[in-house]
Image: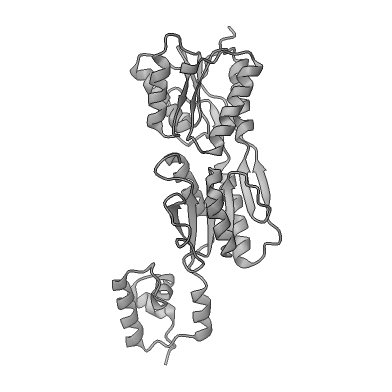
Amino acid sequence: MEEVTILTIAKRANVSHTTVSRALNDSPLVKEETKRKIRKIADDLGYVPNINAKGLVEKRSFIIGIFFSELDTGTSPSFLVDVINRSKEALPEGYSISIDSIEALDGTTAVSRHQYDGAIVVSQSVNDDAFINMMIERGLPVVILNRKIAREDVSNFTTDDYLGARKLMEYAVRMGHKKFGLIKGATDFVSTQDRQQAFVDVTAASDATVKPEWVQQGTYLPDSGYEGMRNILGAIETPTCVFASNDDMAAGAVRACQDLGYSVPDDISIIGYDDMSYAKYLVPRLTTVRKPTDDIVQEGIDALTKLLDGSMTDPIKKVIVPTLIVRDSVKDLRK
């Protein structure tokens, strides 16, 4: 008689072998109705679990948790989609991903080895440190992306937002701009602070003019770029160039200009950050900084894979340099 295996049950139930394993181990990730269906098929076929295999199954969920600082506010929808898509492409076959917000989780109960084989933390804020520490203390394989952290015992892949914003601002200065506005990103995010500091340093070094009404608080979301730009354009005098701290806000800012009858870049120049996939399709095409999101995620997945298969020797630290992308949204004032 042919041996009945998990694969046999999976074919009969028309589900994946991972779902069968979880159902037979009473995983909360499988609906009760599906569990009952799978257990009945297992009983009907006379399935006898292999104890050694069962032990292995209980240690693996084949789910990787991807945790963001904030999902409702702050995290750009475009950045979120980029990270998720790249993660799905880069993960080893058979793994699924689960997305959640660090802010929304109860750090004492929400994350365990039972739920996830490993985790990727896309960190924006130092407020995430308690959550990161908790996962490491519980022995969960984890890598940290996007923000440089102080811990030396965990792999960390990030970029230099200060350098990227400095390159961008220096380009605008070279193009003859001396009056600058800024739409800042989410308040607690390290990237906001780094990009703003580059703005402050370059404008100070070039003796540029920055008036208080030209500096607006944003959230990294498009509507905040729109509102911030409307406020800047409502001032008695306007800057010649506005740095929207990410592309989503820059897109909102461009729209605000159009709604109020301003031409970009003829009347006012706008620069962004991230080089999201749509940036080259905006009208005008956006001058921005390419944040190496794909490379950061790929490096993180590679490191996590090594942690999962036991081949990781020492934590990896890497800073990937951003690239200035010059397009059409900055007017040349040198003429």
In this rendering, the answer to whether 153 lies above or below 211 is below
Left or right, 79 with respect to 177, comes to left
Residue 263 visible? The answer is no
Q: Locate residue 125, reporting x and y percent.
A: 54, 43
Picture quadrant of residue 39? bottom left
Residue drawn at x 44%, y 30% as measured from the top left: 218
In this rendering, the answer to whether 3 lies above or below 106 is below
Residue 19 visible? The answer is yes
Residue at the far top in the pictured view: 335
Picture quadrant of residue 42? bottom left
Q: Locate residue 18, reporting x and y percent.
A: 44, 71
Residue drawn at x 53%, y 46% as measured from the top left: 127
**Viewport quadrant of the N terminus:** bottom left
**Viewport quadrant of the C terminus:** top right
Colour pattern of the rendering: one colour
Q: Locate residue 301, reporting x and y percent.
A: 57, 55
Q: Locate residue 2, reporting x and y percent.
A: 43, 89
Residue drawn at x 43%, y 79% as measured from the top left: 6
Picture quadrant of residue 16? bottom left
